Image: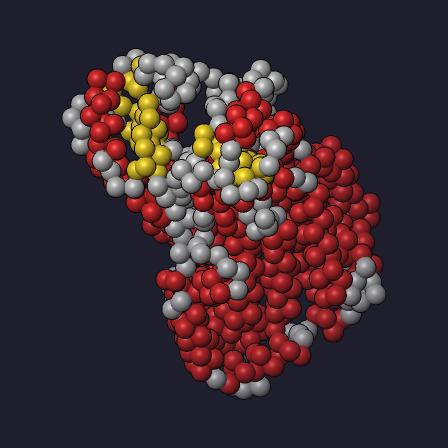
Amino acid sequence: MRKTPRWAFWAVPLLLLFVWLGVGATLGPYAGRLGEVATNDQAAFLPRSAESTRVVDARKPFETSASVPAVLVWTADGERVTGAQQEAATRSVGALAGRPGIAATPSPALLSDDGQAVQAVVPLAPDLGKELPAVLDEVRQAAGQVPGTTLQIAGPAAAQADLLDAFGGIDGLLLGVALGAVLLILLLVYRSVLLPLVIIFSAVLALGLACAVVYALADRGAVRVDGQVQGILSILVIGAATDYALLLAARFREELAARGDRAGAALAAVRRSAGAVTASAATVALGLIALLASDLTNNRALGPVGAIGIACAALTALTFLPAALVLLGRAAYWPATPKPADATDDGHAVWRRIAGLIDRSPRRVWASSALMLLILAAFSPGLSSKGVPLDEIFVNDAPSVGAQQTLARHFPGGSGNPAVIITDAGRAAEVRAAAEGTDGVASVTAATSGGRPGAGEPLVVEGRTRLDATLDAAADSDAAKGTVQRLRERVHAVPGADALVGGYTAQQFDTQQTAARDRTVIAPIVLGIILLILVALLRSVLVPVLLVATVALNFLATLGVSALVFEHLLGFSGTDASVPLYGFVFLVALGVDYNIFLMSRVREESLSHGTREGVLRGLVTTGGVITSAGVVLAATFAALMVIPLAFLVQIAFIVAFGVLLDTLVVRSLLVPALVIDIGPRAWWPSALFRTGTGTGLRTVSVPQGR
């Protein structure tokens, strides 16, 4: 056979490198442009089929102009607001009419029952986007000139402005923190200069490609992106790309030490890692795609966006990274240059000791590990997912939260966020009476042609009219949600009214109910997807079932710890309704990753050395790289805590802690000990089960002790 020309060994790596450098130069800037196509309009992320969502569309004809209300509240520096101060407040907001960003005439200032505060509603244009904070500053400056009072701004407009502030600079800040944490960990673990930089660059390329694809789809309306999805995408891609890169780089180092031929080592590394990387990526991507079964639009938005990110992470790990490693060779690991000893199965001393412990007492190891996880899981029912109160949405002291608390002290708790009732105009009087007779409803007013209560005749559009029911309790409280349930029961009972109840509280209640439904539907789908992928990869049934059961147990244990930490350390009274589902999808799918990395190597070793020795060799060989990958992924998700939103802080803790628990306990102790204790039967019905060594062509004696 003719010898392959030397230049051919370099052609493919160089071509791949140039292609990826072109991708980075062309598409890299899109990593900082997703904010251009992102929306933080919470109305766009409601349950699709919920009653409150139908009200969003049904109420539009009753709004003389689309608007987002800013609720202004003045409190007297003395004991009571004077008549002169109330008149001054009315004049100050009236002067705002017609200014840029003001959608309609503001309401007059209304005095509270205790006489200590007045409030007015200023309708703002709904399409202000990033200009919203500036418009609110103008409102604050104009309305804050009432002598002897303190002005605060609450309501949806103020909350949106605080969200914009929370997500401001998310691209640079989050990316910088995540990449900085990954780089530091890699430098400490691998004590190499070039390899961490190459891995970081690979992750950045993956993120740039993913953001460009998502940008193009979002710009055409094919997917939705908000600040939360944007942040999770960055973390997910960086974490996954780094994990896949670590697995391949470790295998390349091993092959390079054994072969000495960098091209051959790269081909062998890709060939022997591709199955695990592809299965891992498919597990996470399909788990995220399962979110399309959700009725919550923001869950559905994350599914395809996250799957695109995972696909890009796997693509860079299997193409760019091998090309870079071929070109760098041993220099990639400098000053820790690979030596022939690195190719042996001895591994690191720590993992040899762990393997020895498992080998001596496998049943005791898996039983004690499982017992610990079960004890932690027993606390999981204590995690409340009924939603986060308004004063806990932001981790820091957001101005809108303080303003809403002031509003609730002086006015009915639901002021500024009424329950909206859309009903048949001919039955409006009966519906109004039913609403006023509902326990927890403070008052009911009708939408009028003048745009304000009492400023004209009741407004009727196509035979329908609108009523606003102010609730006694704060709009985000459990009491208010209970009132909405009772309100719906009473107005639905009015014959021929075809009444619908929506508004902020109803949206929160419907979101909570839908999230509970999603968990019961999506969790089995995700587990089924993972099980099928594991069966295909490992060609076994029993081992995949054990792996799925262990990661599910790890998830419940993580929820148990989270319940204790959130309540007693972080002071959260509950979690966002979607947190348990997000935590499940991320933690179960990502947790299986490490078991895939481990068990694919165990199966490879078991084909030659038998199950028991194969488990020990697989654990020792992969122990260091998988632990490093787990620490890196935990650190990247922990970076989400830089965004001061309770939702992201909770997701960050659940995934970071759960990944560490999975890496250090489930993958290191529980799974290897279980497989050793079960023996070759664990591989049923594959050849490993029938022969004990897999091929049936040769028999290798299995050592009885170490």
| For residue 461, side relative to residue 547 (left or right) | left
Looking at this view, is 407 or 384 the one in front?
407
Looking at this view, is 605 or 222 the one in front?
222
Looking at this view, is 283 or 516 the one in front?
516
Residue 85 lies, in percent from the top left, at: 54, 30
| For residue 406, side relative to residue 486 (left or right) | right
Q: Residue at x 71, y 62 (%)?
A: 185
Residue 631 lies, in percent from the top left, at: 63, 63
Give the number of callouts.
Answer: 0
| For residue 302, side relative to residue 200 (left or right) | left
- Residue farthest along the left direction in this orientation: 495
Relative to 685, residue 64 above or below:
above
Q: Residue at x 25, y 18 (%)?
A: 425
Relative to 432, residue 282 above or below:
below
Q: Quadrant of residue 332?
A: bottom right
Looking at this view, is 125 or 432 the one in front?
432
Q: Quadrant of residue 58?
A: top left
Q: Residue at x 73, y 54 (%)?
A: 180
Query: Can residue 623 be seen by looking at this rendering?
Result: yes
Q: Residue at x 45, y 32 (%)?
A: 111
Residue 411 lies, in percent from the top left, at: 42, 39
| For residue 305, side relative to residue 244 (left or right) | left
Residue 15 lies, in percent from the top left, at: 76, 40
